Image (tube, rainbow, N blue to C red):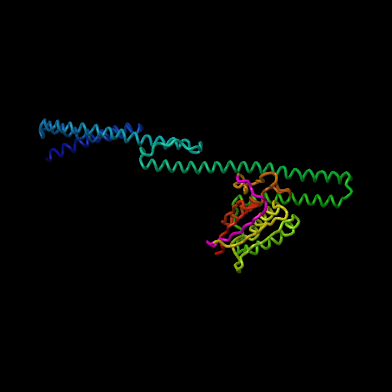
Amino acid sequence: MLTILALTTLWTLVVAAVGAAILWQFRSRSLRTTMIVAALAPMAAALAAVVQSVRAMFISEHDSWVVLWTLAFAALLGLAMSVLLGHWVSTGSRDVGRRLRHLGTSYEPAAAASRSSVPAELAELTDELEMTRRKLATSHERERALEASRRELVAFMSHDLRTPLAGLRAVSEGLEDGVIDDVPGALRQMRSTVDRMTGLVDDLFELSRLSTAPSPRRRSAVSLRELAEDVAGESGERARVSGVRLVVSTPADDDRLAVEGDPDELTRAVTNLVDNAIRHTKPDEAVTLTVDREADGRVRLAVTDGCGGIPADDLDRVFDVGWRGDAQRTPADGGGGLGLAIARGVVESHEGTIAVNNVEGGCAFQIELPANP
């Protein structure tokens, strides 16, 4: 028995060395080939040990044929299973390679291999690649939308700046030629035009500051209740001139509805929403500011107008830079369509959310901010 054990060990080591050399030669070949070699190596070692045992007369010739036939069928079974397993792994690896080649260059879903014939590890890797493709596709669509918004903004701002510049040029030429009799009125018109252009430039600067993730300004406890009342007081005259009623709705208790943030930025965001609501609300209609607290403690501020509603296709674009919608929603005061984009930037910088939805007779802009801890 010791002799049989020694001979078997010797031939196993010899076949293992030969198999390792073959695997080394085929290391750059298909995975299917290496799996076949790895499956046949144990059978070859057993065959060599049986032949040596027959020559040393440890087993009879009849018994050796029984063992050899058994090994032959076992080798065929191992060969078939290794070929099948190699086919599964090769199919899965080719699918992974195809996805890697298309990653970042094509955002369309790739034709997926049958998951029932792919090992679990390759299936998980395929799922991760598909998730990465979806994220890249979403980023690509967002980039295209931002580029389209940027082009619209450039076109709108070019138009909005060209018109007042042409007016300034005409008035200045009239003053220079002495053809304008009402000089004080012309100067007031020029100052009004310059103020409107300054507002456009200020909006662009504020939007640029918000989009570049600036360092946070001073933060303190801000009462949205008092802020809404202050904004309503400042915008009351504008609403009266437009024939719009401005209403503030707050809870009956003494809750200040405080949040932590920058009071100037929050005031500007709410003012932009209120100005936008007044501008697009029909005469004799109402703009309502509602401030209350949600069940989870967050503070909600809603501005409801009487604009008649926004088309469903435009609801997702309302807060895009430079969005104006149809001609009816184009700012009549020469604005650049940046107010809502600035409001979104301010709210998001305060870790809040802003949304819009249509209501009966108009639409409602809602801001939700974390409560002051």
Name which quarter of the figure residue 127 lies in: top left
Q: Residue 337: percent from the left, percent from the top? A: 68, 48
Residue at 73% across, 54% down: 283
- Based on the displayed image, in which of its 4 quarters is residue 121 positioned? top left
Q: Position of residue 330 (x, y in %)?
A: 70, 46
Magenta portion: prevailing SS class: loop
Magenta run includes residue 277: no
Q: Which residues are magenta?
A: 295-312
Q: Measuring from the top left, give residue 262's x and y in whole percent.
A: 62, 60
Tell me how many marks there are: 0
Q: Nearer the viewer, residue 190 or 29?
A: 190
Nearer to the camera, 1 or 251: 251
Q: Is residue 215 left or right of residue 42?
A: right
| Residue farthest bottom in this picture | 254
Vertical relation: 97 (above or below) 258: above
Q: Quadrant of the N terminus?
A: top left
Q: Which residue is farthest front?
A: 360
Horizontal side, residue 54 vs residue 118: left or right: left
Q: Indicate the position of residue 75 as horizontal and vertical percent values.
A: 23, 33
Q: Is residue 170 left or right of residue 160?
A: right
Q: Quadrant of the C terminus?
A: bottom right
Instruction: Give left or right: position of 42 versus 92.
Output: left
- Please tell me whether residue 309 belongs to the stretch shown in magenta: yes
